[in-house]
Image (cartoon, rainbow, N blue to C red):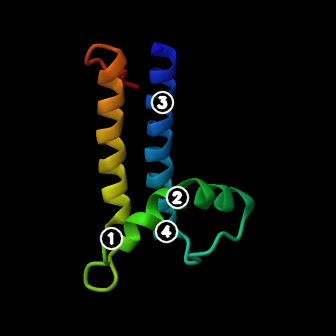
Amino acid sequence: MDVLILATVYGLRFLQLAVLVRVLLSWVDSSPYPDSRWKEVLFTVTDPILNPLRRIIPPVGGMIDLTPMAAIILLQVLESLVGSLGTGGYAPRF
């Protein structure tokens, strides 16, 4: 059971990292579309998390998208909950 919980915690961390990479990529790449294979994979991984949040959270000032921040916070909360389920309150750290 602990292996499953540990794998879930690391999966949630991977998703947090993927969202962060997508945010950083949006600052340096002018194209909002997946125009390369690795960018397509990144969008495929992060879109199921970000798109539902985008329907709930409108852009601030019409330009600033806060959904990645909300997604990272949500993923961190889930990580803490899952980590505390099977490991007695211990969530592994990098």
- For mark 4, give the secondary structure: helix
Disc 3/disc 2 C-alpha distance (Å)? 17 Å
Which residue lies under the disc numbered 3? 8
Which residue lies under the disc numbered 2? 48
Cβ atoms under marks 1 and 3 closer than 8 Å: no
Give coordinates of residue 9: x percent, y percent: 43, 30
Which residue lies under the disc numbered 4? 26
Q: Kindly give the residue lying farthest to the right in the view shown.
A: 37
Q: Residues within 10 Å of mark 2 (few under 14, many from 20)?
A: few
Residue at x 50%, y 40% (from the top left corner)? 14
Q: Quadrant of residue 23?
A: bottom left
- For mark 1, give the secondary structure: helix
N-terminal label among 1 and 3: 3
Q: Amino acid at mark 1?
A: Ile
Disc 4/disc 3 C-alpha distance (Å)? 27 Å
Relative placement, left or right, of 68 versus 15 is: left
Give coordinates of residue 31: x percent, y percent: 59, 77
Front position in the image: 7 or 38: 7
Q: Amino acid at mark 3?
A: Thr
Residue at x 25%, y 18% (from the top left corner)? 89
N-terminal label among 1 and 2: 2
Residue at x 37%, y 21% (from the top left corner)? 92
N-terminal label among 4 and 1: 4
Q: Quadrant of the C terminus?
A: top left
Nearest to viewer (mark 4 / mark 3): 3
Above or below, 29 against 8 in this view is below
Nearest to viewer (mark 4 / mark 1): 1
Q: Residues within 10 Å of mark 4 (few under 14, many from 20)?
A: few
Which residue lies under the disc numbered 1? 56
